[in-house]
Image: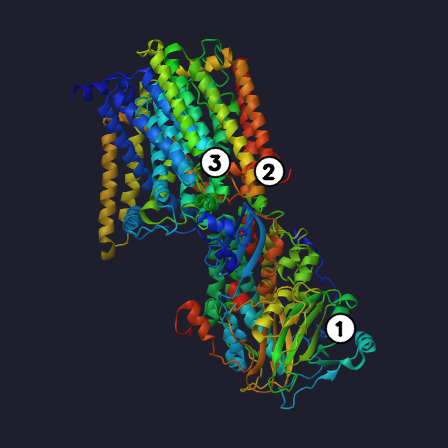
């Protein structure tokens, strides 16, 4: 038990502190939080996309369709689980598991705050990229095991696509890692790149480096950091098979690509993994370029007053959400049919307000605000994902490959070399 | 942008050929294309096909003699040709008379006509002349018609459909199979003796596993 | 009980022998290539195990070995595809001509 | 920090590695073999982590599992394996091969028995924290020439693979 | 095709394979693959089945299998009177039902030697052009959806709804309208018809620009459509391809100009054409056609003549013995009716010359050597309606 409370005072992640109990707790929290985020993303994506497309989206289950994802999940759970007769049963069974496990394994090293990570690995970013690339295997297995032509084509596309874009992704990531070795502060601060300048692959150290250099890496060496970030941002969309790079599951070409033959719970595992992977790669981007858990302007707007002001943001956000929910409750039609919905939405609004109140308590406030800033940045990426989906047509396979090999990789290498040169000069 | 071009004329202005003339622009209420008869309610007798005279027809007559019978009806021209010369006629129409677009290939079944059960109709159009002509030939049931796939690529599916619906074989067609009905189907539904509710119940039973498709 | 270098060596030799068996007995070239990967991995495990005792050179070399394995797999599979296209088979004992 | 329950992890990972390796060479279906190979490689990555070689473990995952095995699977999908599955899986010299392997095993045992004294019985610890940095430094300072040669090798491999696999050049 | 698919299942012993080596030839090259696209596929626009022979993703060969929606419309026509058959034609190209009805009514009027009064001609023109816009909007939405842009679909359907509302107010039906009768139109226009149509024109003009903002300069859209499914003008004419596909290849030919029918000769409009004959040009041509259709509608609404809307036709229609071919410019191309009369109340034979059917023939030429994704794009760009292909 002493172990349990001692950890809270240590300034380390549970993995580093060796607090195994806390490791388990963190893993459980992350698992629950990511699942919840996926459910929320499901609802948000449908709503946002719907409003982009002049329609309302889910409106029936719960007020404004708030319970729709839960209804969907229930439906998927009780749906008949079909395995095609000629499928390779073992591989067919294993594929969704592989995809989900790899998607969730990446969360081990994501730093939601200086201490809010399961562990801090020496090879953090390498581990993340490596494990994220394992998701391909699950997709290939799914496509092959289905013993059908559409899934096979989908998984062929997927494997080629992921292998290609991983390279560009790695190049972009390496240029950010190069920046961690610098000591100077500011956009063009290069410090002393001598023998003792040591970069790092650890996720937490990367964010610390940005803190010490007083600049997010997206602005470092102004066009270079931005270019690397841009490459990463494109490659990560391709890596997660989302529009406009959703060729492996292109519904108008390959019906559903690699998961054509999947149904019910197994299909929902793919769905879960896709969204979990989206959040995971967005987290990498946030960590590498957007300052991770750092709040905006930690150095420029420093001081206790600013600290307090910024730490109120989480509570403030929840109050706004609660206000929106309560406003909708009031504006609902006065009709007995809407009674239950009204009550439900009201309770939901009050719940959000209550969470906001809890977040105002100083100790909670201090521990949570890192997570809040991290989540806000990731949420921006999530919105981008939805936006892309609403705007772009789909690339063709050869164009995708051309973009990857002839534009992204050369640019990535160029940016890497330029970053190295600027860093040394 | 293509629509910015001020040119409003069609690709080729309609020449005053003997073909269907567009009605004069001054009289909008008149329906287009029948100068042959005054627009009165149909009399029992009705208009009758008139002989069609034009330079082109004269050329054809010189070449084919009595094998062809050019007519015009309601402002639309057609040539009835003997089955033996119809291919040459079509070829000549395309090669020397600029009928570069085969609109349709179809057939009509007249079971009561002895030894001439089928009319095979080719509807042709010429982009440069803005003119239509129909070529018609009468066939005995079972006789093959010449395939014009070599002349117009369009004819491929149209002839397949014709074969599917009437059972007329087109000689020289590269791939004469059924197109709308399934491959093993028996009977040709647009023949007059084929009942409107008739179906190949054997095929239905065998392939769909049901008693009747109705 | 402490795990010593020897334990790792035993695992490595087991993998090596399994890989050798695969290379020597299977007909399918794909599986032969995979067996070669097993052998290389056994070597890697040895190198890394010894690097704990004698310094990081072992790890550096294992990285070289992985690079080598990647090159080998790429070329090997390329040959395989070219061969399959011509001969419709990928059995090692049917690949007996120098020129085809 | 100390890894938890080291012997259990070691035995578990080793067992998975060896059993999957057996699976690699025994399965009829190459896809199953490749999946077994994935398990072997991943458990080896775990063993590297236990040996305080996190960088090698990372490279193992990203390159071997994420790259080479994907390549294998890709090629297997391009090739019609249905016919091969129905054929004999082992060649005619399988007995000889088995004997040779057994002899190799015997050699290993013999070496161990003869030179037992030179085998280290203890584990020395290298600092985990700076492993990546040290490996990097070694790669780019001490072993720069081999590194360049390796890159050349990769280039040759790329060209070779393209030439081999392309239908018409 | 059936025996090809069967040959995959061969006996399982090695000896058997050795014995049958001559017979058991692999039907495909090592890297070839047969992909059966449809009849249940999201982007074959109905029940089209395309059998693709692929080398990786590259299309080596295609074969269309059609007929899944064959209802024997031509046979039905022989058992209905002229007036009774009129509603059936709406079910062929159900997205452009008004055009189908116009073609049929005009063909029978020609055969009967009667004419529709000018007011009817004007109303027919307005409704047909509205339907052309509706058809092109539906095409644009689904085509963009095939290529992966999901949003235009909802925009076009939102605007198409307004057209359907006008149809509904005019004749009570939205899709299969049966708006015209032989000899004119059955219904007088409702009060405020002109205002509704004008309001619609003002409403939809900026919307067409909106579609263009989403797509015309979108890089991915350009890459996906430029140079895809190219059809040269000669090939178009040889294959009998008509409509926007023909015009996108650079042939300036439109039946509304070449052989005007209804009231078209009274209005000014352009024929938009393309140069390259690729998917992008076809897209531009169709968008431009929407604008031209709006232009025609505006002119027509301003000049609807007064008078009766139904011409004088006999109660029992017995056209004299003879045959007639009449064709109009439907949104998809030349829609022709070849009607043979034997003097009775029922047509002896009705042949429909369906533009979709003929245009679909060009598919295998257009996708030769393309990728799977292009097949989808090309099927979309041909703008086929399977109801019309199979009839």
Q: Are marks 3 and 1 on the same chain?
A: no
Mark 2 — residue?
A: D166
Image mark 3: chain: C
> Is residue A125 visible in this depiction of the protein?
no
Relative to the observer, which residue lies in front, B88 or A176? B88
Residue at 82 percent across and 77 percent down: it is B58
Give the answer, above or below, for where C9 lies relative to B72: above
Where residue E285 sits, quadrant-wise, is bottom right
Mark 3 — residue?
A: C30
Image mark 1: chain: B
Label 3 residue SS: helix
Q: Is residue D26 left or right of residue E185?
A: left
> Is residue A46 visible in this depiction of the protein?
yes
| Residue E217: image location, x then y, percent | 58, 44
Residue at 65 percent across and 90 percent down: it is B45
Mark 1 — residue?
A: B89
Q: Are marks 1 and 2 in contact (CB under 8 Å)?
A: no
| Residue C42: image location, x then y, percent | 40, 23
Q: Is residue A409 left or right of residue B31?
A: left
Give the answer, above or below, for where B82 lies relative to A373: below
Relative to the observer, which residue lies in front, A19 or A116? A19
Say which of marks 1 and 2 sits in front.
Answer: 2
Say which of marks 3 and 1 sits in front.
Answer: 3
Residue at 25 percent across and 54 percent down: it is A338
Say which of marks 3 and 2 sits in front.
Answer: 3
Residue at 43 percent across and 30 percent down: it is D97
């Amino acid at each position: 038990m002493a172990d349990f409370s001692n950890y809270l005072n240590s300034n380390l992640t549970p993995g580093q502190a060796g607090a195994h109990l806390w490791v388990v707790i963190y893993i459980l929290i992350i698992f629950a939080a990511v699942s919840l985020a996926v459910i929320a993303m499901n609802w948000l994506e449908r709503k946002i996309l719907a409003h982009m497309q002049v329609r309302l989206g889910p409106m029936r289950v719960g007020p404004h369709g708030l319970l729709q994802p839960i209804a969907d999940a229930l439906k998927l759970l009780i749906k008949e689980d079909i395995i095609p007769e000629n499928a390779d049963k073992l591989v067919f069974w294993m594929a969704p598991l592989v995809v989900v496990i790899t998607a969730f394994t990446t969360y081990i090293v994501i730093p939601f705050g200086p201490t809010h990570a399961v562990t801090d690995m020496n090879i953090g970013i390498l581990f993340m990229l490596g494990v994220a690339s394992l998701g391909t295997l699950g997709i290939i297995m799914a496509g092959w095991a289905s013993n059908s032509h559409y899934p096979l084509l989908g998984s062929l596309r997927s494997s080629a696509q992921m292998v290609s874009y991983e390279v560009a992704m790695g190049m972009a990531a390496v240029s950010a890692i190069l920046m961690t070795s610098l000591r100077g502060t500011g956009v063009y601060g290069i410090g002393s790149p001598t023998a003792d300048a040591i970069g790092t692959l650890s996720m937490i150290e990367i964010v610390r480096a940005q803190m010490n250099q007083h600049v997010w890496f997206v602005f470092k060496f102004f066009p270079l950091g931005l270019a690397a970030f841009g490459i990463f941002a494109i490659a990560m969309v391709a890596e997660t098979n989302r529009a406009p790079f959703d060729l492996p599951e292109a519904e108008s070409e390959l019906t559903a690509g690699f998961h054509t033959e999947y149904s019910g719970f197994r299909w929902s595992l793919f769905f879960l993994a896709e969204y979990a992977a989206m959040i995971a790669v967005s987290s990498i981007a946030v960590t590498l370029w957007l300052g991770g858990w750092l709040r905006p302007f930690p150095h420029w707007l420093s001081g206790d007053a600013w600290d307090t002001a910024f730490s109120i943001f989480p509570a403030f956000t929840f109050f706004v959400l609660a206000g929106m929910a309560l406003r909708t409750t009031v504006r609902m039609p006065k009709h007995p049919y809407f009674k239950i919905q009204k009550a439900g939405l009201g309770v939901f609004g009050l719940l959000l307000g209550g969470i906001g109140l809890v977040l105002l308590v100083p100790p909670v406030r201090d521990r949570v605000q890192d997570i809040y800033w991290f989540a806000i940045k990731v949420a921006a990426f999530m919105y981008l994902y939805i936006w892309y989906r609403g705007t772009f047509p789909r690339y063709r396979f050869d164009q995708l490959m051309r973009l990857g090999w002839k534009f992204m990789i050369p640019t990535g290498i160029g940016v890497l070399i330029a970053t190295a040169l600027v860093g040394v000069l | 942008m293509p629509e910015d071009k001020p040119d409003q004329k069609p690709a080729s202005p309609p020449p005053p050929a003997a073909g269907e003339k567009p009605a004069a622009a001054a009289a909008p209420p008149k329906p287009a294309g029948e100068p042959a008869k005054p627009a009165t309610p149909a009399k029992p007798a009705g208009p009758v096909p008139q002989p069609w005279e034009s330079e082109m027809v004269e050329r054809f007559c010189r070449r084919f003699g009595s094998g062809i019978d050019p007519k015009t009806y309601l402002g639309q021209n057609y040539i009835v040709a003997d089955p033996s010369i119809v291919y040459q006629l079509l070829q000549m129409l395309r090669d020397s008379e600029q009928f570069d677009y085969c609109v349709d290939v179809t057939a009509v079944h007249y079971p009561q006509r002895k030894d001439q059960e089928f009319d095979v109709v080719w509807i042709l159009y010429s982009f440069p002349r803005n003119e239509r002509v129909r070529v018609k030939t009468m066939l005995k049931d079972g006789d093959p018609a010449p395939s014009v796939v070599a002349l117009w690529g369009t004819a491929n599916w149209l002839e397949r459909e014709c074969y599917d619906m009437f059972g007329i074989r087109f000689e020289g067609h590269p791939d004469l199979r059924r197109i709308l009905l399934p491959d093993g189907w028996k009977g040709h539904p647009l023949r007059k003796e084929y009942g409107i509710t008739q179906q190949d119940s054997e095929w239905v039973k065998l392939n769909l596993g049901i008693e009747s498709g109705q | 009980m402490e795990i010593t270098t020897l334990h790792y060596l035993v695992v490595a030799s087991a993998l090596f022998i399994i890989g050798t068996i695969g290379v020597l007995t299977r007909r399918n070239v794909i599986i032969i290539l995979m067996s070669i990967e097993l052998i290389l991995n056994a070597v890697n495990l040895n190198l890394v195990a010894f690097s704990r005792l004698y310094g990081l050179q072992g790890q550096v070399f294992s990285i070289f070995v992985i690079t080598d394995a990647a090159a080998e797999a790429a070329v090997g599979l390329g040959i395989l595809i070219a061969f399959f296209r011509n001969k419709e088979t990928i059995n090692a004992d049917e690949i007996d001509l120098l020129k085809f | 920090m100390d890894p938890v329950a080291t012997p259990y992890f070691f035995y578990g990972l080793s067992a998975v590695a060896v059993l999957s390796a057996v699976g690699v060479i025994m399965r009829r279906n190459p896809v199953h073999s490749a999946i077994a190979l994935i398990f072997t490689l991943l458990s080896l990555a775990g063993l590297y982590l236990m040996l305080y070689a996190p960088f090698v473990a990372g490279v193992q995952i990203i390159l071997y599992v994420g790259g080479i095995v994907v390549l294998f699977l890709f090629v297997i999908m391009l090739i019609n394996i249905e016919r091969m599955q129905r054929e004999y899986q082992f060649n005619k010299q399988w007995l000889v091969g088995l004997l040779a392997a057994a002899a190799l095993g015997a050699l290993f045992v013999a070496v161990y028995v003869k030179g037992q004294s030179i085998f280290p019985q203890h584990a020395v610890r290298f600092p985990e924290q700076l492993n990546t940095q040290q490996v990097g430094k070694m790669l780019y300072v001490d072993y720069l020439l081999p590194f360049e040669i390796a890159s050349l090798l990769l280039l040759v491999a790329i060209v070779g693979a393209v030439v081999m696999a392309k239908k018409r050049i | 095709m059936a025996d090809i698919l069967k040959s995959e299942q061969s006996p399982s012993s090695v000896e058997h394979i050795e014995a049958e080596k001559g017979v058991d030839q692999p039907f495909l090259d090592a890297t070839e693959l047969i992909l059966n696209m449809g009849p249940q596929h999201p982007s074959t626009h109905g029940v089209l089945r395309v059998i693709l022979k692929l080398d990786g993703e590259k299309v080596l060969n295609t074969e269309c299998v059609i007929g899944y929606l064959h209802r024997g419309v031509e046979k039905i026509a022989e058992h209905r009177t002229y007036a009774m058959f009129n509603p059936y034609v709406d079910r062929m190209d159900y997205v452009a039902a008004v055009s189908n009805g116009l073609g049929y009514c005009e063909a029978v009027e020609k055969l009967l030697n009667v004419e529709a009064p000018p007011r009817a001609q004007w109303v027919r023109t307005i409704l047909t052009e509205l339907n052309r816009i509706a058809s092109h909007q539906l095409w644009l939405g689904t085509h963009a959806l095939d290529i992966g842009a999901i949003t235009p679909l909802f925009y076009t359907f939102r605007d198409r709804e307004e057209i359907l509302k006008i149809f509904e107010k005019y004749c009570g039906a939205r899709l299969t309208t049966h708006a015209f009768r032989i000899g004119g139109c059955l219904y007088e226009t409702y009060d405020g018809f002109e205002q509704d149509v004008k309001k619609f024109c003002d409403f939809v003009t900026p919307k067409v620009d909106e579609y263009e903002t989403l797509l015309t300069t979108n890089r991915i859209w350009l890459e996906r459509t430029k140079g895809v499914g190219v059809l040269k003008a000669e090939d178009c004419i040889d294959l009998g391809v008509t409509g926007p596909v023909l015009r996108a290849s650079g042939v300036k030919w439109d039946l509304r100009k070449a052989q005007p029918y209804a009231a078209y000769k009274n209005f000014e409009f352009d024929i938009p054409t393309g140069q390259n004959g690729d998917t992008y040009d076809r897209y531009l041509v169709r968008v431009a056609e929407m604008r031209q259709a709006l232009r025609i509608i505006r002119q027509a609404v301003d000049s609807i003549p007064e008078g009766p809307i139904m011409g004088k036709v006999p109660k029992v229609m017995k056209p004299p013995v003879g045959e007639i071919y009449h064709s109009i410019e439907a949104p998809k191309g030349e829609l022709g009716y070849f009607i043979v009369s034997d003097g009775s109340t029922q047509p002896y034979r009705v042949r429909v010359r369906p533009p979709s059917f003929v245009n679909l023939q060009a598919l295998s030429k257009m996708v030769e050597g393309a990728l799977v994704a292009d097949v989808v794009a090309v099927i979309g760009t041909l703008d086929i309606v399977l109801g019309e292909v199979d009839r």
